[in-house]
Each structure stands twice: as structure tokens, then as C-alpha cells.
Amino acid sequence: MLNSNREKSRRRFLGALGASAAWSGLPAGSAAQSRSPEPLPSDDRKLKITSVKAYPVAIGGSFRGATAKFSSDFDPARWRYRGPFAQLVGAIIVEIGTDQGIIGYGMGGGGAAAVAVVERYLSHLLVGANPLNVELLWDQMYSSSSYCGRRGIVVMALSGVDLALWDIAGKHAGRPVYQLIGGTTKDKVPAYYTGFEVEKAKAMGFTAFKIPVREGVVEGRDGMKRMAAQLAEVRKTIGPDAQLLIECGSLWDVPYTLEMDKRLAELRPEFFEEPLLPDDIEGYETLCREVRNTRIASGEHEYTRFGFHELIRHKAVHVLQPDITWSGGLTELRRIAALAAAHSLPVLLHRGGSSYGLNLILATPNCRVAESFGILENTNEIMTAMMPRFENGYYYPSPKPGFGVDLNEALIRKHLRE
């Protein structure tokens, strides 16, 4: 009996030692390894990834080919050229299959280059693994690829994989993803419209409007005048109480932005989105300190919590705008949202009106608004399959398990982008 009690005490001590090593960040030694893991339920233990595929899909954007034509070396269009891998032009769908027949679908970015990352690199870490270990797999994929892709296409590819894994988790549990990550904090989500069909958007119930501008430093003060006139017309159309947001496309610099802050003061813009190139953190820091009539939004083209931590640490952002399909998937955006909440910053997901973004918004208190996705755009079946219900200016949660997207391989292949 005495020996038995000693053995129980020894095991408790070794278990505590193993936990202490994990909390300290030190590698666990033999003590931690001596603990037997809790057995998984039989269904979970059997669930394995059997296939990983990715497809470049056509859901929007205007890219028409690999060869661009410019009028000269100084053509302003050269500063705006985004090629085949950016934004919706570069959308990919990741499809992950399991031995129980559960299939998960996730949207990522990066086009054909990201497809290669998924199928020829990340798949080696996925096939044979338990898809329910989402956090574990994210950390392994990010750690493995960090020497070649801490930002950009690799993280865009990883985002699609992560979303497909969460889709599997929701379908396996028979519950929407937003219920898996804490449940709803709101019963519907107000949307803001991005685009130029302002009158139609207003009739659909939108009360906030984001206008992408096309004038920048290259166009000089003449461009400023044209832009101010355009935005003044928008303000007349939407009325004095609606919110006006301005998407700048990284075409401005610090002096240009500060002058536009003064010129547009009477229009009361809510924010300037990405006036500078994403890596100009010092410039963003200056803007956040010196603008007087609006706020600075950024993050659509930032990646992982590490990039957003730098923006916050330098006080270089007022509104964070990660994209769940580019910035690291649901796993990483939960961390980004928590980081933002700790600094009392709002998170407005880029394209938050997709079913992927909406599930995070529903469960996250400091995410309150969804950007339009598929509203008044040239939608096709595949974009429609990723849209939640929209009525009179609001998106609504879906009761379907997973992300609630109505995707399948036949539909995806029908909309492949060559």
C-alpha cells in the first residue's frame, strides 16, 4: 500500500513537471514524455486526412492574361498592376478529404503558385494526420515554411488549408464553426458596401460605403481635385448620416495623405484604407499621429499575428483589416483579433461578408461589421456558394455545419481559372 501511494505521488510530480516545462517554453524531458496522452474518442482517433487538393478558381477580378500592355515606362497603370496572384483574381479553393468521407473546403489566395504550395509542400504535413488537430497543424505548417514564406503566397496557401480543416471540424461536430469558437456575440452583422454602384447599394439597405479611389501621387494635385469632386458626389448620394470610407490602394505617400485629410475634412470620411505601401510602418506611424479628420486602416495585405503585432506596437494603425483567406486562416485571425482586443482596436475583416469571414465576426466582440462579398459584383456560382444570407444591409448566420459553404468538386472544376 505504501509503495502504491509513493508511485501515485511520483506520477503526480512527474506530470506537474511536464506541465511546468510546457508552460516555461522549455523542451519537455523524460518526465513530460512519461505521461500517457488522453485517449481520443474512437471516431476522432480514426479520422485521417487522405487527400489534399487545390484549385485556382474564377470568382472575380479583371486579370485577362499574363502579358500586360502599357503605354510607356511611365504609364500610371504600371503602379496599379497586380498580376494573376492578387485579390480575387488569385483565389484558390482547397479541398481536404478524410477517411470518413468528410470533405472540407477553404478559400485561399495566390493563384497557381499557391496551388503548388498546397499540393507539393503542405500536403506532406497533412496526409495521414488527424484534421481535428487544427492548431497543431497550423503551427507545423507555419514553422516548416517560415524560411521561405512568412508572408505572401505561402501564408495565403496556408490560409486556405486552415479554413478547410475548420470546415471539417465543424462538419465532424455537426455544428457551425462559429459555435465551435465561442458561439454568437450578435444575431446579425451589419455590412458595408465596397464599390461604385452607390445608389443601388443604398437601396439594398447599406448605410456605410467604401469607395476605391484611383488617383495617387503620380497624378499630383489634378488627381486630388478629381478625387475630391468624385467623393463629394458620393457624399450627396449617401446623405449626411451614412458612413463614407475611402480605399486608397497604397497609391499615396505621407504628405499626400495629410493633404487629403485636410481637403476631405468636410466629407467626414471614417477612414483612409491602406494609403501607403504595407511595409511603410514608419509612414503609417506618422499618419496615425498626425491625421486630424479621419482614421487610418490597414492590414488587408499584412500576414499573421507577427505582422499585426508590429503595426500595433508602432501605433501604426487605428483599424485592423486582416483577410481570413490570406492572413493566416481562422486559426491565426482569432489570435489577431485577440491581440487587437487587448489594445482596444476594432477589427474590420477584409471581405468579411464571405461565409468564412462571417463565422469569425459572429463569435468575436471586437469584429462588428462585415465588408460586402458578392453584393452588386459580377458573381458566379462559386462565389454565391460562399455567400451567407444577406437582407436589407445585414448578413445572417447559417445553421449549416462547418462554414456552411455549398461547394463541391464538380462546381469548383466548372469555374477553374486557367
Image (cartoon, helix red, strand yellow):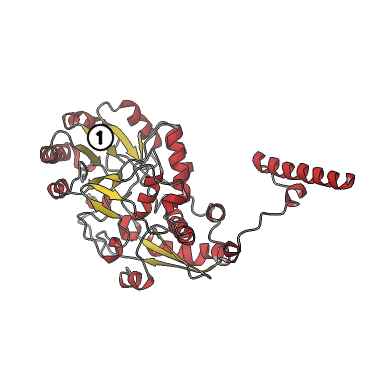
Q: Where is residue 337 in the image (x, y as percent from the top left)?
A: 43, 41
Q: Position of residue 404 (x, y in %)?
A: 37, 59
- Give 212 or 379, whichever is nearer the viewer: 379
Which quadrant: the C terminus?
bottom left
286 w.r.t. 184: above or below: above
Q: Is residue 399 left or right of residue 31?
A: left
- Give 145 or 331, whichever is nearer the viewer: 331
Q: Where is residue 282 in the image (x, y as percent from the top left)?
A: 39, 33
Q: Which residue is drawn at 52% across and 70% down?
A: 100
Can residue 202 be seen?
Answer: yes
- Give 219 or 257, whichever is nearer the viewer: 257
Can residue 65 be seen?
Answer: no
Q: Which residue is drawn at 43% across and 53% down?
A: 177
Q: Position of residue 252 (x, y in %)?
A: 27, 39
Identify the residue at the far front of this view: 1
Q: What element carries label 1?
A: strand
> Picture quarter containing residue 185?
top left
Which amino acid type is shown beneath numbered disc 1? Glu
- Give 252 or 203, whichever is nearer the viewer: 203
Identify the residue at the far right of this view: 2
- Number of labels in the image equals 1
Q: Mark 1 points at which residue?
A: 270
Q: Is residue 251 left or right of residue 149?
A: left
Q: How many C-alpha atoms fall within 10 Å of the one at disc 1: few (<14), some, or many (≥20)?
A: some
